[in-house]
Image (tube, rainbow, N blue to C red):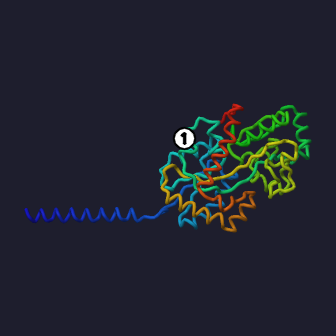
Amino acid sequence: MRVARRMMVRIAGLVLFQTALVVCGAKAETYPSRAITLIVPYPAGGPSDTLARVITERMKTALGQSVIIENVTGAGGSIGTGRVARSAPDGYTLVLGHNQTHVINAATQNLQYDVVKDFEPVTLVADTPQWLVARKTIPPDDIKSFIAWLKQLDGKATGGVVGVGGPTDLAAAFFQKATGTKFQLVPYRGGGPLVQDMLAGQIDFTFGQAANYLGHVRSGTLKPFAVLAKKRWWAAPDVPTMDEAGVKGLDASFWHGLWAPKATPKDVIAKLNAAMVETLADEMVKKRMADIGQEVWPADQQNPAALAAQQRAEIERWWPVIKAAGIKGE
């Protein structure tokens, strides 16, 4: 009997010792200990996807783990963004979003998540303006003749937009009202398919992320008319602003940011932010971004607070406009 009791005590002690080792090992485990998934809520080949592929190549060096891109598309980016909102707050599922996913969708759709309360901001990443660009065979050669051409066609021209109720849709609606023009809006799931149809001559023009069309403009396969910015765009300085063209107040950019699910530990956010700061400081990353028309945010804005402030400012600017116009999304 005593032998049996001694054996039981030894077994219990061994179990406790092994449990302690497991607990200590778990506590000692440093983030990240496995691959990270970066959700891009738009199709492969589009500007957000291209940007993600530039930064993830360098992020994996900074983090010491692979960063796997997963394109989860639909509903103007809200499906992929919602998946991240519902993910475990452990730093292993992130989203590369922009002003549509984390500002506009909340005013145009009935989302099952809160674009502010259900996410932890990590950092601002890159910025590119919108611009008005058209198929190369379109007759007009400047914005004034383009407006005249639209009026002549009286609603028969076609303009491509990404999603319904998104940034490009808002720009198109603003432009129509400001110029007294009419045209048909054709919604697309992402910038990649849209540009392919425009190159093929199936649609006439678009208001879109300038980065998505820069290569085609430089090669002469697409024709730019105006940039939606307060000053001329560094990547295409010969293209006038909308203000210069006589359409006042139409400036809008696609700024990208990195978010994690709400309640992600602060030390994990800090590591992700440090990895992004290191990534965005890399000269090769800056060059590759410039090549695709993306501009890295200044170093003093590469932090969670700056991303949160940018999001708040955009919400204050666009939500009243969207609600007043009665614009609805997908």
Q: From this view, report whether residue 46 is shown above or below residue 178.
A: below
User: Would you identify the image quadrant in which residue 202 lies?
Assistant: top right
Q: Position of residue 109 (x, y in %)?
A: 62, 36
Image quadrant where one finds the C terminus: top right
Res 197 visible: no
Dot 1: element: loop
Which residue sits at x=75%, y=61%?
Answer: 291
| 100 or 141: nearer the viewer | 100
Res 305 visible: yes
- Local packing at callout 1 (Cα closer than 10 Å; few below 14, some 14-19, many 20+) is some
Left or right side of 98 for 28: left
Q: From this view, report whether residue 15 is shown above or below residue 260.
A: below
Q: From this view, report whether residue 154 is shown above or below residue 199.
A: above
Q: For mark 1, what is the residue?
A: 113
Which residue sits at x=63%, y=50%?
Answer: 309
Q: Position of residue 311 (x, y in %)?
A: 63, 47
Left or right side of 232 for 120: left
Which residue sits at x=73%, y=65%?
Answer: 287
Q: Position of residue 314 (x, y in %)?
A: 67, 45
| 200 or 178: nearer the viewer | 178
